[in-house]
Image (spheres, rainbow, N blue to C red):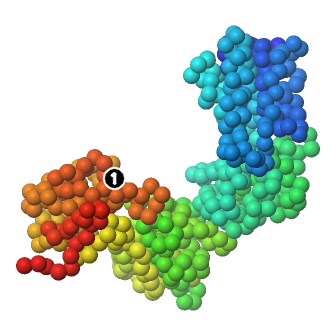
Amino acid sequence: MSGTERALPGHLYGVGVGPGDPGLITLRAAGLIESADVLAYHRAAHRSSTARAIAAAHVRGGVVEEELVYPVTTGTTDHPGGYYGALADFYAECAERLRAHLAAGRSVVVIAEGDPLFYGSFMYVHDALREDFPTEVVPGITAMAAASAAVGTGLCRHEDTLTVLPGTLPVAELARRLADTDAAVIMKLGRTFAAVREALRQAGALERAVYVEGASREGQRVLPVAEVDADSVPYMSIVVVPGGDLRADAAGRSAVAATVAGTVPAAAKVPAGTPGTVHVVGLGPGPQRWLTPEASAVLAQVEHVVGYAPYVARVPQREGLQRHASGNTVELDRARLALDLARSGASVAVVSGGDAGVFGMATAVFEAREAAAEDPGHLDVPVVVHPGVTAAHAASALVGAVLGGDHALVNLSDNLKPWDVLADRLAALVTRDVAVALYNPRSRSRPDTLGRARDLLVEVVGPQRVVVVARHVGREQESVTVTTLGELDVEAVDMGCLVVVGASTTMVTPDGRVWTPRSIRP
């Protein structure tokens, strides 16, 4: 026996046999395969099992073999539940076949190419059986690792982000994700290859993308993606997009580090004629249909897009667009980066949700630009602000017209202003009968702010003021609750919500519509 591990009666094992070279099977995997009562493996109807071929030297005579043959592999089926419905039924059938062996006290080893839990079919029988039988997973070398070794360069280094992507994603989505990462591995090719190549082109990654077919196997092929015949690509091939090259480390890493810090390298700061423009763009609160034509036109022509990562993700990727996504609390760093890029001659879009001029990036850009003592060159950069639909007015429209009269927009975060100032403003607004939309109502770091605000408002105007809580306005998870200050459930509110406190005149109609009159009644 090649390994010392023996399969135990009534146990289920998911065993990775590696990417193709039998020499890459681990000793533990070999021992379990050799001692199994039942050896199971998935395969397509039109070909034999690759996993079985890799493990052939370790399969003992007399072992019971369970071939689990896929009913469909192309995504086309007449099953009432479609492709995934057909596979769900198939995996349920597989689980029942293996359950019978396990219940009879037999050890069952399910072998899988690469690793069993990395895009592997074993996961589905594992999900169905793990609660009823002892289950173990033996990892295997992934095809991704073998493909990276075949390419023969560093896949990712230092703080590089590596993203593993299925080639079945739509072109625009795949391009966006490729543009947002330093290094990538794309699985599931075959008929998707032409679309994958187009996504790589749009993301500006085609030149460094490498195609690997049959990684670690006899006949392994390694080619630049641009040179591959799309009609010859098998499903199990892989595209590797390496991160920075070691030979470019000194220059490349200094550029990356500077970008993270909110600047560009000194050489790029030297003015070359007229500076570019920083466009500050409001994306609206969610759905693409609320993006204005003006904003769409700007995003279609700029060279760089800068912003909080979820907002940058909403901008479609295209050829020539460079993306600079960052976290949620580095607004001035983002603004300085945009100004630096524009000063070097580039056109830049800084994106915000809703309207960029309402608690958005517009003020951060102007603040960074006016810091002349820190960097006077920023004053020469033109800044244009493009408005967007605000979250407050989208929420008001959702319920009717709760902001139809005089109203104010207040950021409930006390990160940039003390609570005393915030409390004074809230009390002044509601006592003068102004409806108030509260942005950033409650976060993990500020779980008590909304509760304090509610208690304050109840104290000054009573518990009966109408309150609207709008969650994820315009998105798939959209919901709305109409309540009162006294009944407001603070614990149900998070940063995905916008809270509107109505005026004393705000009305709720029998059909649940909420509106505030424009006139002041005597």
Residue drawn 42% across the image and 79% down it: 387
Furthest residue toward bottom: 273
> Percent x, y for residue 522?
7, 79
Q: Quadrant of residue 267?
A: bottom right
Q: Secondary structure at mark 1?
A: loop
Residue drawn 13% across the image and 79% down it: 520
> Percent x, y for residue 198?
74, 65
Which quadrant holds the N terminus? top right
> Percent x, y for residue 497?
34, 58
Q: Is residue 204 visible?
A: no
User: Looking at the picture, does residue 364 appear above or below residue 216?
Assistant: below
* Front residue of 78 and 273: 78
Along the horizontal axis of the image, is 347 left or right of 141? Answer: left
> Percent x, y for residue 45?
85, 37
Along the horizontal axis of the image, is 319 left or right of 261? Answer: right
User: Looking at the picture, does residue 272 appear above or below residue 169?
Assistant: below
Furthest residue toward right: 219
Residue drawn 76% across the image and 47% down it: 77
Along the horizontal axis of the image, is 82 left or right of 445? Answer: right
Residue drawn 56% across the image and 81% down it: 297
Q: Is residue 465 visible?
A: yes
Furthest residue toward front: 510
The amino acid pointed to by label 1 is Asp
Q: Residues within 10 Å of mark 1 (few under 14, many from 20)?
A: some
User: Looking at the picture, does residue 255 appear above or below residue 147?
Assistant: below
Q: Which residue is mark 1?
A: 494
